């Protein structure tokens, strides 16, 4: 059986997914390999903006546009750790290259540069991440918990958080009102 790599895909929570952490979420998969998967929920802004986050780590935002950007609850794992999803990839101390244009950075240097107005062109900052053990994500997809579709940077960086979920569904040509909570097998 061929394995599917969900790196650079969106996971769209199905109505059957009743887990409060993931119900109604759109998750961007940053890594998927034999060891498991890691992603960021990209449609759950927290009651925190970058000005507040920067203040907690002794930085200040260089401009009001940057200061008012929301911080997202990326998932339930390591919620005290920051993750910056960004384009272009750049040269940061701790970056995982997801695609030729998208990177995920966890080192402070990117935040320092952002605070001075020298950060990446587009970014999404999250606290915490979503993680799956080996085979767990594939099993959850078989159980009809998630739909998946190839991700687009436009949905991540150009749409407001409340529009991202439905935009990802539109990539599949799916209307949420027609989705069943039951899994089917042909």
Image (tube, rainbow, N blue to C red):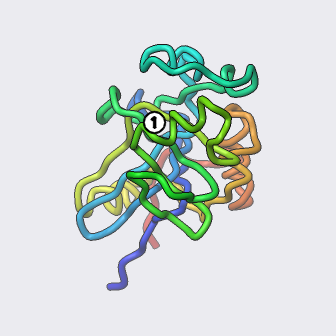
Q: From what the image shows, is residue 34 above or below residue 173? A: below
Q: Which residue is mark 1?
A: 74
| Residue under the image location 51 percent in, 58 percent down | 91
- Classify residue 81 by image quadrant: top left
Q: Quadrant of the N terminus?
A: bottom left
| Residue under the image location 37 percent in, 52 percent down | 38
| Residue under the image location 63 percent in, 54 percent down | 87
Q: Position of residue 144 (x, y in %)?
A: 44, 54
Query: Viewer-proximal residue, 14 or 131?
Result: 131
| Residue under the image location 63 percent in, 58 percent down | 88
Query: Dot 1: few (<14), some (14–19), or many (≥20) neighbours within 10 Å?
Result: many
Q: Is residue 58 visible?
A: yes
Please identify the residue farthest to the bottom as the structure is shown: 1
Residue 26 left/right relative to 118: left
Query: Viewer-proximal residue, 132 or 126?
Result: 126
Q: Position of residue 94 (x, y in %)?
A: 38, 52
Q: Position of residue 149 (x, y in %)?
A: 59, 62
User: Dot 1 lies on which element?
Assistant: loop
Residue 182 left/right relative to 157: left
Q: Position of residue 148 (x, y in %)?
A: 54, 60
């Amino acid at each position: 059986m061929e394995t599917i790599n969900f790196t650079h895909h969106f996971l769209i929570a199905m109505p059957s997914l009743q887990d409060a952490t993931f119900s109604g979420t759109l998750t961007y998969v940053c890594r998927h390999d034999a060891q498991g998967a890691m992603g960021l929920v990209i449609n759950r802004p927290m009651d925190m903006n970058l000005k507040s986050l920067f203040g907690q780590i002794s930085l200040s935002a260089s401009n009001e546009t940057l200061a008012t950007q929301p911080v997202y609850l990326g998932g339930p794992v390591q919620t005290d750790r920051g993750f910056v999803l960004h384009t272009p990839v750049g040269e940061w101390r701790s970056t995982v290259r997801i695609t030729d244009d998208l990177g995920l950075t966890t080192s402070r240097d990117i935040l320092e540069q952002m605070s001075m107005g020298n950060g990446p062109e587009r970014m999404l900052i999250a606290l915490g991440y979503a993680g799956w053990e080996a085979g767990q994500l594939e099993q959850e997809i078989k159980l009809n918990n998630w739909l998946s579709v190839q991700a687009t940077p436009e949905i991540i960086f150009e749409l407001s958080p409340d529009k991202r979920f439905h935009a990802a569904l539109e990539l599949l040509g799916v209307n949420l009102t027609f989705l069943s909570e039951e899994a089917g097998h042909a």
